Structure formats: structure tokens, C-alpha cells
Image (tube, rainbow, N blue to C red):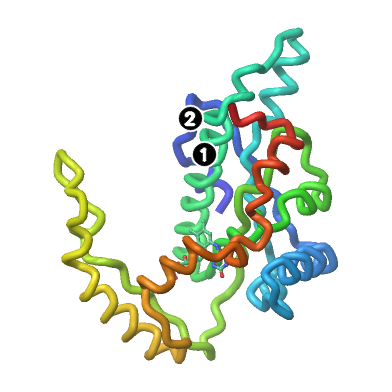
Amino acid sequence: MIAAAQSASNSSALNQWSVVAVTDAELKQQISDKVARSVPVARIPWIEEAPALLLWVGDLSRGAEITKEAGEVPFVFDYLDSMLMASIDASLAAQNAAVAAESMGLGIVYLGVMRNIARDIAEMINLPPHSFVTFGMAVGRPDTSRTSGIRPRPAQPMVLHHNQYEQGRYRDYLDDYENAYKAFRNSQNMSTKTWVGAVIESATSIDYMGGREQLRETLTERGFKLK
Ligand SMILES: Cc1cc2nc3c(=O)[nH]c(=O)nc-3n(C[C@H](O)[C@H](O)[C@H](O)COP(=O)(O)O)c2cc1C
């Protein structure tokens, strides 16, 4: 998985990402408990039960150290784009690892909830300044006794535009997507909700953020000035 991750393209060949593989059961449980409290839910089985939790790190720390040791000031890292660059590179690496894992019969769950506890998790895994956990990824063997399936995606024209962005065209494809969304949720015995409802909830619920509303503050403390 890591070989595949390292094979991903990365911005300017600067390698501004790292990954911390948490396999220590006690540490993984502590992380899981802290994330669960932030949601809040009693427990997050897909972190607790997975043998490995990969924490994908947007990592400017090596660059900052190398630059400072050369007697220079890494002021470019004060800009928002540097944080974005590291996050993009971490994401591309992670997705390559995800595809590699699935090709070997493993399963993964991306974990944006790790940013709920951005400050704490950085301490728990001893992250240096100028780095942060962009997201996590639980890795394990899929439990074939549990229901699972591929979530439907919207029709291609909802996401694909030719030459110019056709504003509002997505509306033509919403009904079909709602039907597929509903059928999928029914087939998996999931609670009834609509995709549009989920979108609105994600856009209007501070609870949905689970602590991520403080991310700018944490990133600033960790050395990202986000100018
Ligand atoms: C960046 C990212 C963060 C995610 N965070 C979470 C998460 O915190 N918890 C979770 O259960 N699933 C999380 N997911 C999983 C998505 O809900 C899931 O990928 C999506 O519903 C599509 O389903 P599929 O991956 O099975 O195709 C995340 C996915 C991505 C790409």
C-alpha cells in the first residue's frame, strides 16, 4: 500500500506528506475513544476493530527544518496554498494506497473525523510543527457477514462539463440520484434520508463539524499561518 502511495504524483516532487501506521491496539483504542466523544457516539467499531489505522499527514515539517537548517526562513509555508498542496499530496497518496488495498482484498474506510481531534491527535502521535493529520484510514479485512455494497454515484453529467461549467444542470439529475440513493439505503437497512437532506444537514449543522470548526486555530498553532 505504501509503495503504491509513494508512486502517486506529488507536487514539485517535494514529497510533502507522511503516513503514521497505528497498529498499537491501546493507542488505536485511545484515538477511537477520543474521536467517538467528538462525534459524539459510544464507539466507532470500524476504527476499533480494524487492525491498522493509517493517519495521512500533510507534512511541511521536513521542508521547514531543511530550510531553517540552511539559515533561510520558510515563509512560503505561511500561505494557504502550502497547506493545500500538502493536503492534496497526502490525498493522492492515500487514494493510491486505497486502490492497492482493495486489489489485495482488504477494505478501507477514510476518516475525516480525525480532524475533529486535530490538536489531540497531533500530540498523541508526536507530530512535528508544520504537519497535521489530514484524515485517517482504517484498514482491515471486510467482514463478509455484514451487509455492504457500492454506494451509487450521480449520473456523469452531474459532475462532467465540457469546456464551460453549465451552472444548475445538476438539477436535471437529482431525481434519479435520489431514487438510487433511496434504493441503496433500503437495500442496506440504513435509516431513511434523502441525499438533498444530507447535503443540507452537512451545510447547516455545526454538530456535523464535531470540532472541525476549530481547525484553523489548530493549524495556526501548528505553524500554518494560512495567509
Ligand atoms: C476524505 C474522506 C473522509 C471521510 N470521512 C469519513 C468518516 O469520518 N467516517 C466514515 O465513516 N466515513 C468517512 N468517509 C467515507 C465516505 O462516507 C464514503 O467514502 C462515501 O460514503 C462513499 O462510499 P464508498 O467509499 O463506499 O464508495 C470519508 C471519505 C472521504 C473521501
For disc 2, the marked residue is 11
Residue lying farthest to the front in this orientation? 204
> Is residue 127 found left or right of 53 in the rendered image?
right
Assess disc 2: are there few (<14), some (14-19) or many (≥20) residues with their C-alpha within 10 Å of its C-alpha.
few
- Total count of labels: 2
For disc 1, the marked residue is 89
Residue 114: percent from left, percent from top: 66, 58
> Is residue 94 found left or right of 125 in the rendered image?
left
Q: Quadrant of the N terminus?
A: bottom right
Q: Residue at x 23, y 59 (%)?
A: 158
Assess disc 1: are there few (<14), some (14-19) or many (≥20) residues with their C-alpha within 10 Å of its C-alpha.
many
Disc 1 marks which amino acid? Asp
Closer-to-camera residue (11/209): 209
Q: Are marks 2 and 1 in contact (CB under 8 Å)?
A: yes
- 120 vs 198: above or below: above
Closer-to-camera residue (60/7): 60
Disc 2 marks which amino acid? Ser
Give the secondary structure at mark 2: helix
Residue 138 occupies quadrant: bottom right
Give the secondary structure at mark 1: helix
Residue 163: percent from left, percent from top: 15, 39
Residue 131: percent from left, percent from top: 69, 37
Closer-to-camera residue (154/52): 154
